[in-house]
Image (spheres, rainbow, N blue to C red):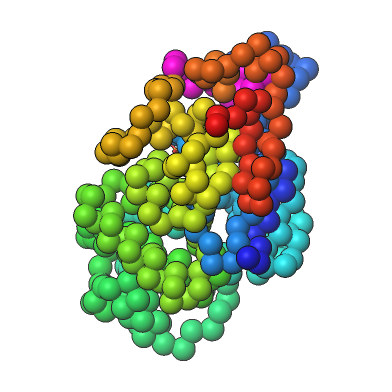
Amino acid sequence: MNTLLGIANLSVSFPLSSGLLDMFSADREWHLRVLEDISLDLGQGETLGLVGESGSGKTTLARAVLGLVPRSAGTITFDGEAIAGRSDRAFRTMRRKAAMMFQDPVASLSPRRKVGALLVEPHIIHGEPLIDRAEAAARLLALVGLPAAFADRYPHELSGGQARRVGVARALALNPKMVLADEPTAGLDVSVQGEILNLMARLKGEFGLSYIVVTHNLALIRHVSDRLAIMYLGRLVEVGATADIFRMPRHPYTRALLEAEPIPDPRRRRASLAIEGEIPSILNRPVGCEFHTRCAVARDRCRGQAPEFTRYAPGCAVRCHYPLE
Ligand SMILES: Nc1ncnc2c1ncn2[C@@H]1O[C@H](COP(=O)(O)OP(=O)(O)OP(=O)(O)O)[C@@H](O)[C@H]1O
Ligand SMILES: [Mg+2]
């Protein structure tokens, strides 16, 4: 499979605002290390599910890929081009070919603009000529199964599922190659979640898209993703084929996440590896393996030495001293 997106050793940190911290550390600059050394590829036509607890850095990763937050280290290549800095021409080209569906669709749509105006915004932002705006909006609405009359509605007049459809349509406005969908089904009824995923799958086939789908919902992503990437405290801990990960997760964290999912499966008779305790703060990352404080199978080495992200097959890797077998 050809690689569409390549992320290598990507790190992102945010400077901590001054205030209380300055009293303790006037001479030190404090940073919140939100993403640490992320390496990940996305193949042409592939759907990758990005999974992890709240605060693990999923949204930040999607935003960093598109240059919406600055990276502190790492390289990104897209469609054969290396993307250097934020103002880089390659980044602008990339943002035309890579679209983001934001986490909260209604909040991410300007409330005072009608759907029709929102749908042609990408053209305007990127200076793409548009002969007939109404026609372009109608075409995009039709793509996602909404009547042309929706162009006259305001975002708050849409149901959750309709707002999500508008988000999909807006993402497709400029014929992208890649769509980064941040929690595309969060907050929707189960039946509507299925509709949105089916719509995304159909459009993927129609337009040859590649997807990164950010989600908490393993049961749902299971059926639409080719590979899964599992994040913990801003690091990838496991990447692999979806079917393999469900059959045999290698990282204890992945296994615990899967066991927390209410998927009825009579064949599943593993000893339980429930996640213990609270998720640590990224301000105070555990020494050694950062998962050891919650890991049911941690040993001495895990408390002292950080494991590498080790590739065991093409496109598959795990960050654990003692991967499960
Ligand atoms: N602009 C920012 N400035 C400072 N900290 C930030 C910023 N954006 C994100 N963070 C912090 O980075 C961490 C990761 O946030 P992020 O939103 O990427 O997580 P997430 O995995 O998408 O979570 P969720 O599942 O809740 O959407 C959090 O601790 C968050 O507070
Ligand atoms: Mg998020």
267 and 120: which one is in front?
267
Magenta stretch encompasses residue 288: yes
Residue at image point 53% right, 62% down: 46
- Relative to 33, is 303 above or below? above
Magenta stretch encompasses residue 51: no
234 and 64: which one is in front?
234
- Relative to 26, is 2 above or below? below
On screen, residue 140 versus residue 10, left or right, reads left
Number of marks drawn: 0
> How far across and how far down the image is residue 64, in percent?
62, 49
Task: Read off the magenta span.
Answer: 276-290
Residue 109: in sight, yes or no?
A: yes
On screen, residue 149 versus residue 14, left or right, reads left
Q: Residue furthest bottom?
A: 131
Residue at image point 73% right, 16% down: 26
95 and 272: which one is in front?
272
Residue 59: in sight, yes or no?
A: no
**Quadrant in which the C terminus is drawn:** top right
32 and 153: which one is in front?
32
- Relative to 28, is 95 above or below? below
On screen, residue 31 versus residue 166, left or right, reads right
**Quadrant in which the N terminus is drawn:** bottom right
Residue at image point 49% right, 84% down: 130
**Quadrant of residue 24 in the image?**
top right
- Relative to 239, is 114 above or below? below
> How far across and how far down the image is residue 239, in percent?
58, 44
> How far across and how far down the image is residue 74, in percent?
74, 46
Residue at image point 57% right, 50% down: 63
Most prominent secondary structure in the magenta stretch? Answer: loop
> How far across and how far down the image is residue 177, in percent?
55, 70
